[in-house]
Image: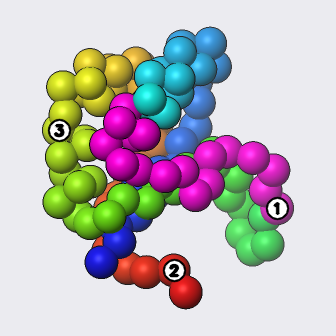
Amino acid sequence: MSAYVIVELEVTDPERYAAYAKLAQESVARHGGRFVIRGGPQEVIEGDWSPRMVMVEFDSLDAVREWYRSEDYQACLPMRLESSKGRMIAVEGYAG
């Protein structure tokens, strides 16, 4: 069953975050992930909420764990932590 990494971010250092995003994109692709949502225009429908949203689909929760714990992602993770504030979860499910 597919698993989705959902990230809610507030970017605090856009230049450093952009450098992280390039490395993260390469890491995700290397580990079989596919971006479903990666920033982009958004419209608040209810409440007061406007984070940067990212959603990545992997083949399974095991694939998410392998990606997140991988040497290449762990090498760029500090850049995200230093350039943004946010939360990340992995959810098992399917689209369709």
Asked if residue 78 can be seen in this view, the reply is: yes
Which residue matches tag 3?
A: 69
Q: Secondary structure at mark 1?
A: loop
Please say if the residues under marks 1 and 2 sit with CB atoms less than 8 Å apart.
no
Say left or right for 33 vs 70: right
Crowding around mark 2 (Cα neighbors within 10 Å: few <14, some 14 to 19, many 20+) is few
Q: Amino acid at mark 2?
A: Ala
Which residue matches tag 2?
A: 95
Indicate whether residue 30 is drawn in magenta.
yes
Q: Secondary structure at mark 2?
A: loop
Q: Look at discs 1 and 3 and give the one toward the viewer.
A: 3
Q: Amino acid at mark 3?
A: Arg
The percent position of residue 35, horizontal first and vertical second, equals 54, 51
Work out whether mark 3 precedes mark 2 in sequence or the reverse, and give the earlier one: 3
Q: Amino acid at mark 1?
A: Glu
Q: Look at discs 1 and 2 and give the one toward the viewer.
A: 2
Q: Look at discs 3 and 2 and give the one toward the viewer.
A: 2
Q: Residue at x 40, y 50 (%)?
A: 33
Which residue matches tag 1?
A: 43
The percent position of residue 10, horizontal first and vertical second, equals 58, 37
> In the rendered view, would you say 50 is above or below 73?
below
